[in-house]
């Protein structure tokens, strides 16, 4: 069992509080990443999607998980379970200092998570308080003009890591 914290960083210009649309524990937000088998090291060809809304029963015992998948190479089953309550938005201060914000904690059994993919469904607000919702980061950046604050706003240089958490 390995707990992996997905952390994100970006350059935020005149923006703060980058997070999923419904907050860090948004049940409708989809996380996309590739899976690496913990047994044979095979990397999935396509991204896998998990969200808090989608649960499946564990094959043994009681409880649920968010993903059960069999490695196509070695046949080993693995699970990924999302653990709520540890995420925080990426703030302007964190961005300026190059720090990463914790987004979601994953309990991984049989798999490692790699290559998080930024997609749609994000929100952010300008330093003047204008809210930008349903932001699509799939192109790797976001640029707009804040009418209220009379300044350009931008998200660029998106980065994500999965860090082992004890």
Image (spheres, rainbow, N blue to C red):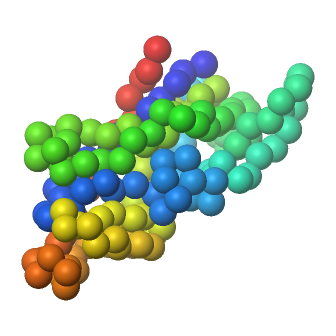
Residue occupying the point 77% across, 46% down: 55
Question: Residue sitting at 71 percent across and 53 percent down?
Answer: 53
Mark yes or no: residue 54 visible.
yes
Quarter of the image with the N terminus in it? top right
Residue 67 lies, in percent from the top left, at: 70, 43
Determine which quarter of the picture holds residue 49. bottom right
> Observer-nearest residue: 148 or 71?
148
Where does residue 18 sit, x and y in percent of width and height? 33, 56
Q: How many marks?
A: 0
119 w.r.t. 2: above or below:
below
In the rendered image, the vertical position of residue 97 relative to residue 135, given as above or below:
above
Residue plotted at (11% across, 47% down): 96
Residue 80 is situated, as x and y percent measured from the top left of the image, at 64, 36
Side of 89 where 53 appears, left or right: right
Is any atom of residue 42 visible in this view? no
Question: Relative to residue 124, is residue 60 depicted above or below?
Answer: above
Q: Where, by quadrant of the figure, is residue 29 drawn?
A: bottom right
Residue 73 point in image, percent of width and height: 65, 40
97 and 31: which is toward the camera? 97
- For this view, does 94 lie left or right of residue 103? left
For the point 46% across and 57% down, which residue is it? 20
**Res 100 quadrant in image:** top left
Q: Is residue 11 left or right of 60 when viewed as pictured?
A: left
């Amino acid at each position: 069992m390995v707990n992996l914290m997905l952390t994100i960083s970006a350059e935020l210009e005149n923006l703060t509080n980058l997070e999923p649309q419904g907050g860090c524990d948004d049940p409708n937000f989809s996380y996309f990443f590739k899976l690496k088998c913990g047994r044979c090291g095979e990397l999935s060809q396509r991204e896998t999607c998990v969200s808090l809304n989608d649960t499946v029963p564990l094959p043994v015992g009681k409880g649920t998980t968010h993903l059960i998948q069999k490695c196509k190479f070695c046949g080993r089953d693995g699970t990924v379970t999302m653990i709520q309550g540890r995420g925080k938005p990426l703030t302007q201060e964190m961005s300026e200092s190059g720090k990463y914000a914790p987004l979601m904690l994953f309990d991984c059994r049989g798999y490692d998570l790699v290559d998080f993919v930024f997609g749609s469904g994000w929100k952010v607000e300008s330093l003047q308080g204008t809210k930008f919702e349903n932001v699509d980061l799939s192109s790797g950046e976001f640029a707009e003009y804040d009418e209220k604050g009379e300044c350009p706003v931008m998200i660029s240089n998106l980065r994500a890591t999965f860090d082992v958490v004890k």
